[in-house]
Image: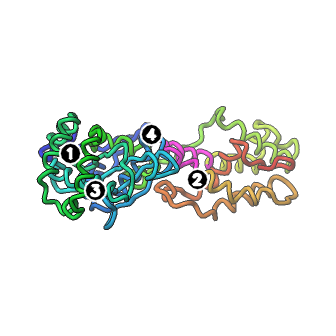
Amino acid sequence: MLEGDDEADSAVPPPKLMLSGAQLHFPSLPSPKKMVFAYDPDEFEEFVKEWVPALRTRYVRVERHGGSGDHGVDVAAYLTRQAMEGEWHNYQCKHYGDALTWSKAAPEMRKLFAAVVQGHYTLPSRYIFTAPIIGRSLVRQFAKPSETRAKFLDELASTADPVITSLGPARQHVVLDLATSTDFSMFETIDMDDMLDLHRTTPHWAERFTQPLPARPQIMKPPSEHTPDETRYVKKLLDVYRELWGDKADTLERVAEHPSARDHLHRQREAFYSAESLRLFARDATPEGHFQAILDDVHTIVVEVADGPYHNGWERLRAVVAEAGRVALTETILAKQVRPLDRKGVCHHLANDDRLTWCQGGHA
């Protein structure tokens, strides 16, 4: 629980990556919590905007309002299409060098009631303070809504805050009436650890906090015996050999006795296992979906090549593999790890998934 500035962020050892028996270590970087502490107010508001949609409540829309003239709204989350004219939640982002306390929260609360009275928006059903450090005393204060309202009203009666005094006597009285009738359980705080746990479930986490990848392990070598995971792409290669060389290379046994087919199959298996090494590396070192993105990038381009007219499957296979070597991959942390042999192997992974087929009548 991070509620006071006297609680330092404890150092967390970087995770270890296991792949094919090798133990890899990520380079040491500041923890996400320390990175958030270093944000400026604008960057912290953007972080909160990314985090809000991960909450269980299904918001229709989330908008960042922070800046001059925001009337006390940094991030607004709408529960209806009526936006601020319907039910909505206000996420107030306060990024200080020390803990958020009552003395810093109360002026924001006064700003809220004044803005409602002035007609800038309707009263939100929840008002959540977000900050890297939340003072313990503020957490305890908000845990007693009736006492919080009494404290707020007592200060409101004698405040010299221009947000209130500039309203004039009539509107000041309306602010007092509104605050008196408001359930102060609407005011809450959120702990930074909880925020980070939720942000981790968003697509923004990988871009904002992902550690640099460790060195990629040695590429896997194909085993002497074919595995069940190779069944589909190897069968499609046998179809190519059968079409090209007839019954001289239509089974694995005959391929082993056919120098050209044997060497070709060996090279394709090396490529398949190179891509398989990349897949396992991505599984353990990157967020979910990075290897699939490589497959999709390659498929998007080469499927058009595979769909062209060819005399046989051999020509189609060669054309597709050549094009795979030229595909511009989406820039991700994994894309930088892709080698030429991986691209070739990705074609066989796509064939294994029945997204590519080499011989006539078997388009992707």
Q: Earlier in the sequence, mark 4 or mark 1?
A: 4
Query: Residue beneath label 3, please?
Result: 114
| Residue at 20% from the left image edge and 34% from the top image edge | 144
Say which amino acid is labelled 4: Thr
Mark with earlier residue (2, 1): 1
Query: Tag 2's secondary structure?
Result: helix
Label 2 vs 4, first from the N-terminus? 4
CA separation, marks 2 and 3?
53 Å
Asked which secondary structure carries label 1, the reply is loop
Q: Looking at the image, do the residues carrying marks 2 and 3 touch, with CB atoms under 8 Å apart?
A: no
Residue at 25% x, 58% y is: 170
Residue 269 within the magenta-colored segment of the rendering: no
Q: Can you identify the residue that label 2 sits on?
A: 294
Q: Who comes first in sequence, dot 2 or dot 3? A: 3
Q: Is residue 282 left or right of residue 299?
A: left
Answer above or below: position of 194 versus 130. Answer: above
Identified at 36% across, 52% down, the residue is: 48
